[in-house]
Amino acid sequence: MEQASNFLKDTDRTVRQQAWETIQQRRLVDKDELNILFDELVKLRHQVALNAGFENYRDYMFQALGRFDYTPKDCYDFAEAIEKEIVPILKEQAEKRREALGLAELKPWDLEVSTSGKPMLKPFNNGEELIDKSIACFNAIHPSLGEKLSIMKANHLFDVESRMGKAPGGYNYPLAETGAPFIFMNAANSLRDLTTMVHEGGHAIHTFLTANLELNDFKHCPSEVAELASMSMELISMDQWSVYFDNEEELNRAKKEQLADVLKTLPWVAVIDQFQHWIYTNPDHNAADRETAFKQIYTRFGAGFADWTDNETPFGNVWQKQLHLFEVPFYYIEYAIAQLGAIAVWKNYKENPEKGLSQYLEALSLGYTKPMNEIYETAGIKFDFSDTYVKELAAFVKEELEKLG
């Protein structure tokens, strides 16, 4: 799937459409089987909640995940803020994309291709080069960061290239005895792989900084903190992306694509989170009800900003691609919380690189020895999902995007 998705960036629209349709056809092969499995999961999860004395699995999971700093209502309010402040910016960008590509409407296979009319960006040629360039990038941010990735390379703690039969995804895995991190991913020489590497590199730095904390539980941060480490690094590292791109025009393109992705993350997270609230507060639903609910929620947040006419079946099945829904229920809103925090960290870094970086690393060094809001405060940012804060940070990203032309 990782390699197939590269064809969605092809400048030939026929190739893009064929790739997209092939990917969807493959997903639909398992649609019914996965729906049966998901029905069973919902039933079992609801029973777990009832057994534990909760009304529904949503309320149970908020306790199980240690969400003491925010409530389900905060999630609904955050989703509304994203709908109000982020979706209009993305709609505006989608319209610019449509015009630039000279299309009557954007289809789902038109969302990844560069509007420059040029082929997809290739920031590296192979896994070894990705690792070496990333070490140079982190070194340019601060020598201590580059040194940490060099230690990982010397100890063979990277498995980055995509290959047949390799499990999908990407992650950073802390090794308990040594305290060192291990990075696993499926690189196919795309810009997304660069961002995956610096994202997982942020997690790796976090692992190094918390390795010597006294208790193991101090090293296991809630995702709202763990993802702040990784998503902030995606943005902080952008100032050093000339390591991957020696051409100014390509560098600008890469930054623009990254910032567009940052904004796109927020509505998609809102979709998956609101969908989960619906699933587990309506436990008696069936697969058809679930599909209808998903379509309504996805449409509310722009439905990917594409026209899905004649693609109703794939449209209703988009949710199945999100592994979290099956494996780690309710783990997703953290990405939006952390993405918002990461934008704030980056804003601080742009205004004062030395202070911004220092506050960020100090916050990571805390591990989970402080409450979430105090960790965010240490990073020099707010633990806040209000529409005012969302609007302020969205305006900052929009301004940075406009600077890139």
Image (cartoon, helix red, strand yellow):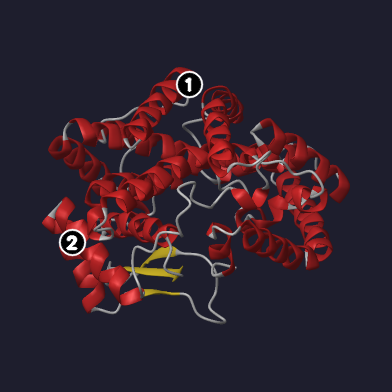
Quadrant containing the N terminus in the rendered view: bottom right
Number of disc labels: 2
Classify mark 1: residues with Cα within 10 Å, few (<14), some (14-19) or many (20+): some
Taking 168 as reference, is 31 left or right?
right
Q: Which mark is residue 328?
A: none
Circle 1 residue = 386
**Residue 291 drawn at (x, y percent):** 81, 46
Against 249, residue 75 (above or below) is above
**Residue 114 drawn at (x, y percent):** 48, 50
Kindly identify the amino acid type of the residue bearing the numbered disc 2: Gly
Choose top left, top right, bottom left or bottom right for residue 139.
Answer: bottom left
At 56% from the left and 26% from the top, the residue drawn is 88
Kindly identify the amino acid type of the residue bearing the numbered disc 1: Ser
**Residue 97 drawn at (x, y percent):** 54, 39
Extreme-top residue of the structure: 388
Circle 2 residue = 146
Quadrant containing the C terminus in the rendered view: top left
At 69% from the left and 40% from the top, the residue drawn is 275
At 78% from the left and 67% from the top, the residue drawn is 30
Taking 41 as reference, is 332 left or right?
left
Q: Earlier in the sequence, mark 2 or mark 1?
A: 2
- Disc 2 secondary structure class: helix
Choose top left, top right, bottom left or bottom right for residue 176.
Answer: bottom left
Extreme-front residue of the structure: 102
- For marks 2 and 1, give the one nearer the viewer: 2
**Residue 287 drawn at (x, y percent):** 85, 50
Residue 286 in view in this figure: no
